[in-house]
Image (spheres, rainbow, N blue to C red):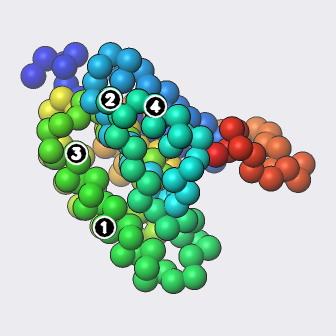
Amino acid sequence: MENNKKGIVLLYTGNGKGKSTAAFGQALRAAGHDWPVCIIQFIKANKRTGEARGFAGLVDKVEFHVMGTGFIFSAEDREEAVKAAREAFAFAREKIMSGQYRMVVLDEFTYLFNYGLVDWQDIKDLIENRPADLHLVITGRNDSKRLIDAADLVTEMKEIKHPYQAGFKARKGIEF
């Protein structure tokens, strides 16, 4: 396959804000070129976020799925979070391997293997065996060297200053 038609893996990582926003920008750009796009959020449980509402206006080009149960470290029932994560991964694999999309965004995906919810080998197999023209966009903190090595483009968001440090809470339109 010609290099310009081959799909790439893009990883947005780091402790700074903007990883999901960058991925959604990629999805918006792809949709603007009439590419079919699928976005899957792995941690967030709220279907009423700004991004979910914004992409609802692009349903003819972008599928948006919220698969999480909330943040894993605050989940009362870890077993339920593990089950939900594995089901979300199976759903993502199905979407990726379907051949229906030019781009799939896996938002907050790094938590699945960072917390041991999904085996790295399963993730590696999915990345390596995806359709040749599929662009895979992955976001999340605490990436591993293995994921960095598997990606074609890696951008690290580094926090310099954040309103949380001054006591601000998450705000509509900024954090969600």
Q: Which mark is residue 96?
A: 3
Q: Which mark is residue 57?
A: 4
**Residue at mark 2 to residue at mark 4: CA–CA distance:** 9 Å
Are the residues at dot 3 and dot 4 in contact (C-beta closer than 8 Å)?
A: no
**Residue at mark 3 to residue at mark 1: CA–CA distance:** 14 Å
Q: Nearer the viewer, mark 2 or mark 4?
A: 4
Query: Given the image, on which type of amino acid does mark 3 rest?
Result: Ile
Query: Given the image, on which type of amino acid does mark 2 rest?
Result: Lys
- Mark 4: few/some/many CA within 10 Å (<14, 14-19, 20+): few
Where residue 53 sits in the image (x, y, percent)? 53, 40
Question: Dot 4: what SS?
Answer: helix
- Mark 2: few/some/many CA within 10 Å (<14, 14-19, 20+): many
In the depicted view, which residue is nearer to us: 14 or 89? 89
Query: Given the image, on which type of amino acid does mark 1 rest?
Result: Glu
**Which sits earlier in the primary sequence, circle 3 or circle 4?**
4
Residue to which mark 2 is pinned: 61
Using the rendered view, name the quadrant where residue 159 is placed.
Answer: top right
